[in-house]
Structure formats: structure tokens, C-alpha cells
Image (cartoon, rainbow, N blue to C red):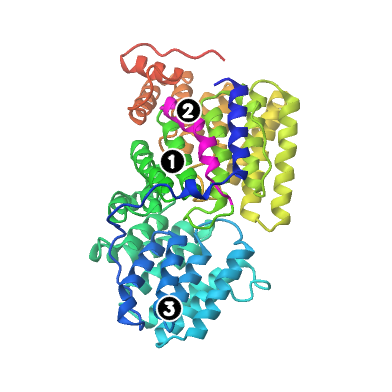
């Protein structure tokens, strides 16, 4: 795509954010037979509402928050004394528990009001009162207690409740979810997430049609060292609850972690179609970002291009303030910024990346992706002025995030700014300083974990370090960095291709051949002839001599 047309296409997509048609959002009818899995949640509410209550909880388990709220409200209208209906509304109002960042004031207000309605309606059992007071911790004194403190308080309340009601499957499940929600990067692997997963796995064996068990296992193991444990749940979840768009998308979290690109593509094609049918444009865009990522990692650039070109139409149906989908509004804005940035960076289209047009939103970390892509592109084509301006914009966005208390996203933007600065330093001729700065960025990124909103970084810092080492004619060191990248991000196209080139430049034909074979395995559905790296990989596979690309 010509850079001008790319910028115009993305400008149209962002401009379309202001035009949202409610009629368009609901023009696709729901399936005639709803399939949400099997849920049985014991309550003291009237027998008349038990089946609708179970359906509402099933929707909640698949993060169909808007539909779940509607369903719980219907239960409350039928049985006004069912305080647990308002518990469900409060938990659904919180939204995606794995959403990084502060909940909006509107969500806090909605949840707090639901808690008050629940107390007014009343709860008939000690268990139900404890459920209600536990979820109240997420909202209690929100103007005085920070979000992390409230999330931990909820986790502790749910753990105590589960301990006092051993054998209550739904309670065990929600307690495990609270554990996973409260996990932080330093203890994600060894404690919180692993503990949550070990609670959920035996329950899933006993209840293989339960949507929440499959869903929460995927989330609990959504880190590189644990992802393989979720593969069975990932392959089953979409079949358990195919009526929920998020249930169709969620398996791709595991597939992405393991480099199973075609499985990720297939499930996100279904997820995007279901989200469009249900008028959940944020979820559609979120699934599309994961889909584009998988297409690009597997060398299917033409398919990725078709989705890039479809962004303006998707954006025309997207309301960033809507709260009905599993994916919050920020997920849609994130996808609109990430997809064009991925399109340029993954293919090494540096001139196009440098010409991406920035768009301002109320989410500085989404805006930062365009500036990051511009900075990397500009440094590769020697445009110091554009690179410097993009880095300054990154630092300004980081400052906005810090001022807003968004420490996680401030840290992610800082990694981008460090990496971009390192490459600018390189083209300025300060090679040792550039390498040290790029190493520091990689170490910073190693100490963090990606958010569920993204399938992966636009350009992993350690991968960028490997590419810088190739530029500095240190192929053996570059190979180590690409190999380290692949441990965390298996199947990444640029890391596999970079490793093959580094091995070739090091004179290690066996290693180069092995990495090219792995690249071809990842790209078994790739375009023909496709990118130059694939052409070279196919040559090597036939026994041809390695050829080193010009610098």
C-alpha cells in the first residue's frame, strides 16, 4: 500500500469513531439456538427465576457483560426479593477483570448502585450475604482506596468464602478468578496464576461443559511458561459457548502464546463475525487485531491487508463509550492504532511506518503505538527529525499516563521510548551507547508482562536488540537475543527470520537451516512467493547454499 493511501485509510477509521449507528449494530440476528454452556448456580431466589439466573451467570462467565446485566435485571424484575440478581449486576459492571488500567467513574457508580439495590432487596442466606459483601470490596470507598487495594480485598473475601463453603463449585471458580485478577507480574508464574489454575483444572474434568472453567483456565495460564497447560481448555471453549463472541475469541490467547497461528486466525474469524452480529464492535476490533497479528506472523500479508482496509467500516460501527462487550471501548481504539502499526513494522515497511499519521484519543497508551512505529520507521530510513519528534511524543504520553496513575501503561510506553531512543542513538553514530540503551529496554520489558488487550508487542525489545546487533555485525550475539525472544514469543516471524540470518552470518548452516525450517512450519499458509525471508527459507529447504541479504 502506498503510504498516502495507508494514512488516508486509517484517518477514515479514526474519523468514523464519531459516527455510530445503533441500527447498524443490531442488524445481525442472534442464532436461533443459544449455546452458552452448562451453569448451575444455587440461589435462594424463587424457582421461577432459577433458569434465567443460570443463563445470566453463563453470560457473565463468558464476559458478555451487557447481556448479563440485561439478564440479571430481568431476574430482578421477576423476583424483586432476589438480591443476588444485583450481585450479578455489580460484578458485570466491573467489566473485564483482566483489563489493565483504572475502571471508569461510570463503572464504579454503576457497581455501587447495584450493591445498594442488592442490600435493599435482601439476601436470605449467609453465603449470599458474603458473596454480596465480597463484590462490594471492589467498589467500597473507591474515592479513598486505590484500585489495587480493592482488588486484593475482593480476592481475600472470596478466598475466605470459598474456605467456609468447600465443595461449592461456582464459589471455587469465582475465587480462582479473583486470584488470577489480583496477580501481578513478579508473582504471576509461581503463585497466583498457578494456584488459580490448579483450583480450576480438576473442576473442568468433572464439568467439561462449563464455560467459566474453560475461560478462566485460559486466563490463569496466559503467560509464556504456563500457556501449554491451557491448550485443551482453549480448544474446547469455543465449542462450549459458541453464542458468546468472547468465547470464540478467547482461545486465541493460548494459541498466540504457543505460536499456533492458523488456530488463532480461525477462532478470531468466528469471533469477529459473532461480535459483528451482536453489535459488539469493540470485541470485533479486538478479535481483528489478534487475527491480523496471526496473519502477519504466518506470512499471510494479503489477508492482513484486507483487514487493514476494512478498518474504516468497522470504525463506523464502533462507539468507544459502549460497555456492552467483553472488550471495553479502549480495546477498539487500541486495535485501530495497533493494526496499521503492525502492518508496517512486521513487514519492515519502514518508510510507511515513518509516515503513519498520529491520532489523539483519551487513551495515551494507544496513541503511543503510532508514535513508536513512526520512530522505528524513521530511524531505519535515516529521518532523525521525525524520529526525535515521535520520541518526544512518546515521552509526553508517558507523562500523561503517570499523571493519571496508569503506572502499567506508563511503563510500557517508557519501554517503547527507550527502544526508539536507542535506534536514534545508533543512526547518530553512538553505537556503544545505542546498544546499552537497547539492552536496558529489553531488560525492562523482560520484567513486565503483556496486557490481555494485545496479542503481543508491536516489536519486542529483545527482538529489536537482535536486529541492532545484526546491524553492528555481531551475529552470534544477535542469535542469542532472537532465541530469547522466541522463548517468550514462539513463532514470531521476525525473530525466526532474524535467528536464521544471524546463524547464517555466524557460519552455522545447521542452525540457520533449522530456523528456516521453523519459519516455514509457521508459515505453511503463507503468500506465494511472499516476503524475501520466505523465499530464502524455501531455497535453503531445497538444499541451496545460504545467501546473505545485503546490508
Q: Furthest residue to the front?
A: 23
Q: Which residues are magenta?
A: 300-320
User: Picture quarter containing residue 419?
Assistant: top right
The secondary structure that most of the magenta stretch takes on is: helix
Question: Mark 2 Cα within 10 Å, few/some/many (few <14, many 20+)?
Answer: some
**Closer to the N terminus: mark 3 or mark 2?**
3
Q: Where is residue 53 drawn, in percent x and y?
A: 36, 72
User: Picture quarter containing residue 316?
Assistant: top right
The residue carrying mark 3 is 84
Comparing 21 with 261, the one in front is 21
Comparing 339 with 540, the one in front is 339
Q: Check residue 312 for magenta coloring.
A: yes
Q: Secondary structure at mark 2?
A: helix
Mark 2 to mark 1 CA distance (whole Å)? 28 Å
Question: Mark 1 Cα within 10 Å, few/some/many (few <14, many 20+)?
Answer: few
Quadrant housing the C terminus: top right
Q: From where the camera sits, is residue 472 visible?
A: no
Question: Mark 3 Cα within 10 Å, few/some/many (few <14, many 20+)?
Answer: many
**Closer to the N terminus: mark 2 or mark 1?**
2
Tell whether 171 sits left or right of 403. Answer: left
Q: Where is residue 38 drawn, in percent x and y?
A: 27, 64
The residue carrying mark 1 is 487
Q: Secondary structure at mark 1?
A: helix
Q: From where the camera sits, is residue 462 visible?
A: yes
- The tag on residue 305 is 2
Q: Check residue 119 for magenta coloring.
A: no
Tell whether 204 sits left or right of 339. Answer: left
Q: Residue at x 43, y 59 (%)?
A: 63
Mark 3 to mark 2 CA distance (whole Å)? 47 Å
Amino acid at each position: 500500500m502506498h503510504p498516502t493511501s495507508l494514512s488516508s485509510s486509517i484517518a477514515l477509521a479514526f474519523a468514523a469513531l464519531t459516527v455510530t449507528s445503533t441500527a447498524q449494530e443490531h442488524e445481525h440476528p442472534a442464532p436461533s439456538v443459544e449455546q452458552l454452556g452448562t451453569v448451575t448456580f444455587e440461589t435462594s431466589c424463587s424457582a421461577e427465576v432459577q433458569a434465567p439466573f443460570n443463563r445470566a451467570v453463563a453470560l457473565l462467565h463468558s464476559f458478555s457483560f451487557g447481556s448479563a446485566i440485561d439478564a440479571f435485571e430481568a431476574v430482578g424484575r421477576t423476583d424483586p426479593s432476589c438480591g443476588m440478581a444485583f450481585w450479578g449486576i455489580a460484578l458485570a459492571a466491573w467489566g473485564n477483570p483482566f483489563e489493565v488500567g483504572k475502571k471508569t467513574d461510570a463503572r464504579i457508580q454503576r457497581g455501587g448502585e447495584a450493591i445498594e439495590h442488592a442490600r435493599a432487596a435482601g439476601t436470605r442466606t449467609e453465603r449470599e450475604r458474603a458473596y454480596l459483601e465480597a463484590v462490594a470490596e471492589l467498589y467500597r470507598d473507591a474515592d479513598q482506596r486505590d484500585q489495587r487495594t480493592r482488588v486484593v480485598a475482593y480476592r481475600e473475601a472470596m478466598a475466605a468464602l470459598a474456605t467456609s463453603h468447600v465443595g461449592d463449585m461456582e464459589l471455587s471458580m469465582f475465587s480462582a478468578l479473583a486470584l488470577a485478577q489480583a496477580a501481578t507480574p513478579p508473582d504471576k508464574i509461581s503463585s497466583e496464576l498457578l494456584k488459580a489454575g490448579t483450583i480450576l483444572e480438576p473442576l473442568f474434568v468433572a464439568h467439561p461443559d462449563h464455560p467459566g472453567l474453560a475461560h478462566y483456565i485460559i486466563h490463569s495460564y496466559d503467560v509464556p511458561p504456563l500457556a501449554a497447560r491451557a491448550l485443551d481448555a482453549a480448544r474446547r471453549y469455543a465449542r462450549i459457548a459458541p453464542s458468546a463472541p468472547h468465547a470464540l475469541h478467547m482461545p486465541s490467547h493460548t494459541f498466540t502464546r504457543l505460536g499456533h497461528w492458523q488456530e488463532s486466525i480461525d477462532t478470531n474469524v468466528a469471533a469477529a463475525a459473532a461480535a459483528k452480529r451482536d453489535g459488539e464492535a469493540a470485541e470485533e476490533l479486538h478479535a481483528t487485531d489478534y487475527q491480523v497479528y496471526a496473519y502477519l506472523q504466518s506470512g499471510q500479508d494479503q489477508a492482513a491487508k484486507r483487514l487493514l482496509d476494512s478498518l474504516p467500516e468497522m470504525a463506523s460501527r464502533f462507539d468507544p463509550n459502549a460497555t456492552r462487550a467483553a472488550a471495553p471501548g479502549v480495546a477498539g481504539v487500541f486495535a485501530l492504532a495497533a493494526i496499521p502499526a503492525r502492518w508496517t513494522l512486521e513487514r519492515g515497511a519502514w518508510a510507511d511506518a515513518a509516515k503513519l499519521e498520529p491520532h489523539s484519543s483519551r487513551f495515551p497508551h494507544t496513541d503511543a503505538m503510532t508514535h513508536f512505529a513512526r520512530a522505528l520507521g524513521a530511524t531505519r530510513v535515516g529521518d532523525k527529525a521525525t524520529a526525535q519528534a515521535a520520541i518526544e511524543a512518546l515521552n509526553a504520553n508517558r507523562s500523561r499516563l503517570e499523571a493519571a496513575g496508569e503506572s502499567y501503561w506508563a511503563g510500557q510506553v517508557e519501554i517503547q521510548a527507550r527502544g526508539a531512543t536507542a535506534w536514534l542513538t545508533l543512526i547518530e553514530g553512538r553505537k556503544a551507547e545505542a546498544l546499552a540503551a537497547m539492552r536496558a529496554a529489553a531488560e525492562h520489558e523482560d520484567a513486565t508482562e503483556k496486557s490481555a488487550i494485545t496479542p503481543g508487542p508491536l516489536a519486542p525489545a529483545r527482538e529489536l536488540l537482535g536486529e541492532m546487533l545484526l546491524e553492528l555485525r555481531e551475529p552470534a550475539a544477535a542469535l542469542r537475543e532472537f532465541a530469547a525472544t522466541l522463548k517468550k514469543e514462539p513463532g514470531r516471524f521476525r525473530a525466526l527470520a532474524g535467528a536464521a540470518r544471524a546463524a547464517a552470518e555466524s557460519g552455522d548452516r545447521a542452525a540457520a537451516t533449522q530456523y528456516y525450517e521453523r519459519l516455514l512450519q509457521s508459515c505453511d499458509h503463507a503468500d506465494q512467493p511472499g516476503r524475501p525471508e520466505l523465499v530464502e527459507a524455501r531455497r535453503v529447504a531445497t538444499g541451496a547454499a545460504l545467501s546473505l541479504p545485503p546490508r
